[in-house]
Image (tube, grey):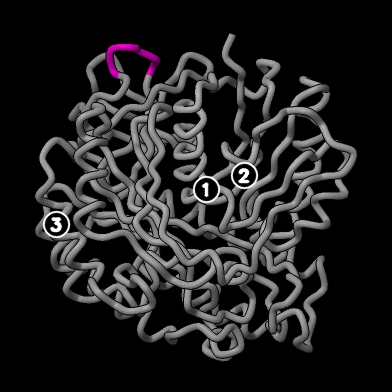
Amino acid sequence: MNKKVAFYTLGCKLNYSESSAMGRLFTQAGYQIVEFTDIPDVYVINTCSVTENADKKCKKIVKEALKISPDAYVTIVGCYAQLKPQEIAEIPGVDMVLGAAEKFQLVDYITDLTKQPKTLVYNQPVSEANQFVASYSIGDRTRTFLKVQDGCDYSCSFCTIPLARGGSRSDTIEHAIAQAKQIAASGVKEIVLTGVNLGDFGIRNGERQDKFVDLVKALDRVEGIDRIRISSIEPNLLTDEIIEFVASSQRFVPHFHIPLQSGSNKILGLMRRRYRRELYADRVAKIKQLMPDCCIGVDVIVGFPGETREDFLDTYNFLNELNISYLHVFTYSERENTLAAEMEGTVPGSTRADRSKMLHILSDKKRRAFYATQIGEDSEVLFEGDNKDGYMHGFTRNYVKVKAKYDPVLVNELKTVKLTAVGSDGDVEITESEEILVH
């Protein structure tokens, strides 16, 4: 009987694409991929370390895994594994820790499932993680996350990602196209492009060899994919040329996720971000000029060291006036070996929580206002396979979330429907007349 392996993935879309790629390596080696609760022989926990909470989650998942399968071989990979391998090695029940340069050889490292008295740690300096390893997620949803870039050469004062993933490096355009064609052949209808610093695509062997816009133009010509979505792109790398091309494309959808982090130029300077709020506002205006129905998501951090009440209100008012669609709100947490951790002006935890709550409320308001602008429109929805309390969900091209009574015929299907009303819970329901109630 084949050995069984289960994955648990924390963090970003990039991690999900990489877990899928690692899963295919296990399949090729004769393993059977199973659910977390199916008493696997091997657990692979792919970690994140963007926030302190992610570190705590890793410990909890190991504990839960060993309740389900006490004899399972537990391997930890991902950003937390690169940053704090010895800390992970001390978690009871962990058998192996693999760093950024080793994680894609994990099948080779797991040659024997015999538990050793001491946790095995294979963790080279992050500078050794200098090769791009392609990956994409498949088989678990109607969308596929296609990784085309990894690592980051930026030095934002709050971020550990360069320490966990190394420098910026990318796939070739030719190989990314080949991967997209494989995905298209599998029947997936939407590709989400992912990377650590996606707009910096094109660096190989330490030198820039391509531009992100050239990848976008090449992917737009791939037959068999209905939608391509750009997951997240820095405002200083989101050029007019990219915006104009997406506006004219039949495959690239009108949805951008653009990190802001702060609406205060003072705080942006302390964060060592490579733009100011004026450039951000210009990018939003350019998008809305060419694509009035475009959905724009924003990352924002509250409670950064030195953030006064006035600085926070700068951010709040800037976002309130900006024509954006939703927020991803992050509460600042101190990370070792970052400049921000040594800065003065620590914001009390209760203040951070209050500011986070204010921005979450603003996000709800923005999302409902954006949805309201779509009422009466005929929209193409790609339905997913979830079934929660008899309902399924899907998304329009511009990321309006739609809710319908579960129908297996709709799974992974594109259906044009009419958006009729914004409902109370933020989603969209489809009626018998095939109209949609936007909740």
Q: How far apart are marks 1 and 3 (CA)?
A: 25 Å
Q: Which mark is residue 218?
A: 3
Q: Which residue is drawn at 24% across and 27% down?
A: 187
Vertical relation: 390 (above or below) 222: above
Residue visible at 66% across and 15% down in the picture: 38
- The residue identified by callout 1 is 15
Q: Is residue 432 left or right of 268 when viewed as pictured?
A: left
For image coordinates 26% across by 44% down, the residue present is 179
Q: Residues within 10 Å of mark 1 (few under 14, many from 20)?
A: many
Q: Which residue is drawn at 74% across and 30% down?
A: 73
Q: In this view, does 41 lie above or below 97?
A: above
| Badge 1 amino acid | Asn
Question: What amino acid does circle 2 point to?
Answer: Asn
Whether residue 409 is in magenta: the answer is yes
287 in the magenta segment: no
Q: Distance between the residues labelled 1 and 2?
A: 7 Å
- Which quadrant is home to the N terminus? top right
Q: In which quarter of the image is the C terminus?
A: top left
- The quadrant in which residue 100 appears is bottom right
Residue 320 percent coordinates (x, y): 47, 69
